[in-house]
Amino acid sequence: MAPDMDWDRKVGTAEDVRRIFENVPAMLVGLEGPDHRFVAANAAYRTLSPTFVGVGQLAREVYPELEGQQIYHMFDRVYQTGEPQSGSEWRLQADFDGSGIEERFFDFVVTPRRRADGSIEGVQILFDDVTSRVRERLAAEAQVEELSERYRHVRDSAIVMQQALLAPSVPVVSGADLTAQYLVAARDTAAGGDWFDTVALGDRLVLIVGDVVGHGVEAAAVMSQLRTALRMQVWAGHTIVEALQAVEAFHDQVPGSTSATICVGSLDLATGEFQYCTAGHPPPLLVTADAKSRYLEPSGGGPLGSATGFPVRTEMLNIDDSIMLYTDGLVERPGRPLGPAQQNSPNWRQPSPAAAASSSMRRPDPSTACARKHSNCCCDPPVTTTTSHCLRHNAGSRRRRCA
């Protein structure tokens, strides 16, 4: 403090300064000496601590229970070093108002106070009780955790339901090894409208992959009805066209099924002839025995309800050729259109020759085959749930094995 300063002119009269200090809305106290004796306390502080007797008391006498809670060590550090200290949402347990020990949270700043010669005479603390803010935040976090737990429970239940609605397994047939995979994206609720199915009919094998618009339990319910209807038609021996026409007629009775897409492929196990209809669905991916890959031409059929018919195309599969049917979650990306040639998308690549050749030589376990196809074909994880169905034509008795 400068002794020759005109305090009334530069700072204000003692009465004005005292009145301003008294009315500062934040709590403000001044402590003196190494033992931190109260020399000033404003009205906001006295409201927090109505049992405060007055200046001259030691802080440790007013709040003995704060010993061991690091706050007095902080006062000591500021007094000894002159370095300010601060805390945010600092938890203190003390008898603040005479009603017993309670927990409160404070934001505060502790600064040194110096004499005219620069030496430290004490510290002052400016602080605010933020207990309500902390408790509201903790309550909100607890509510979020509770909702998250409920979501996880619903999601787990949806996974169980989805698995019950999907085909439990793929058939084991002479002449072909198959596998299918259902991958759930992180943003989905696990239940959805993607499905796969396989129907073995003697020397003919029918592969199906479909996708209902939407997500959640409603889409899963629609998916289950369409899957059952199509499976019944195929099992009855109807051709691809006849089966899809029957499902097209049936879809009027299934709300939410309009615009569902289906890809059906029928493989002649004896000749390798593969007939397929895309019905609004992405076309199958073919990987040949020499590790070259391409998409088959879309058949031109539209989704359910489009009334565009169900034209069929034919492709001949050779020994060790692989074919994969999939849903568009494998290739779609937010903000990027899904065109007729998915291979032109920057986030889609054809399987590398090394990967395909390695798969052919090692004859991978069918349980991991579709997972390898996913990793070979897609740079990024799917942003929506995706289903894939794979097979590979194997040497020997014209067997087809999944790659």
Image (tube, rainbow, N blue to C red):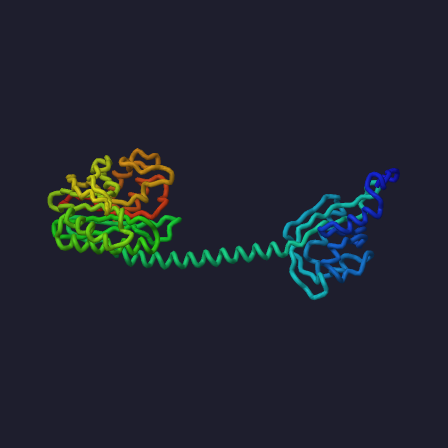
Residue 232: x and y in percent read 18, 55
Depth check, front residue: 275 or 340: 340
The x and y percentages for residue 395 are: 16, 43
Residue at the far bottom: name it. Answer: 99
In the displayed structure image, the side of residue 150 where residue 242 appears, left or right: left
Residue 169 visible in the picture: no
> Front-most of 347 and 192?
192
Residue at 31% from the left image edge and 48% from the top image edge: 213
Please state, as top left, top right, bottom left or bottom right, where the N terminus lies in the image: top right
Q: Which quarter of the rendered picture does the C terminus lie within? A: top left
Count the marks: how many? Answer: 0
Q: Which residue appears at 34% of the width and 34% of the height? A: 346
Q: Is residue 303 left or right of residue 337?
A: left
Give the left or right position of residue 16, taking residue 374 as reference: right
Q: Position of residue 202 (x, y in %)?
A: 12, 52
- In the figure, residue 272 lies in which quadrant? top left
Q: Is residue 100 above or below residue 369?
A: below
Q: Nearer the viewer, residue 390 or 106?
A: 106
Q: Can you see residue 60? A: yes
Above/below status of 376 relative to 98: above
Q: What is the x, y in percent for residue 357? A: 25, 38
Q: Residue furthest right?
A: 4
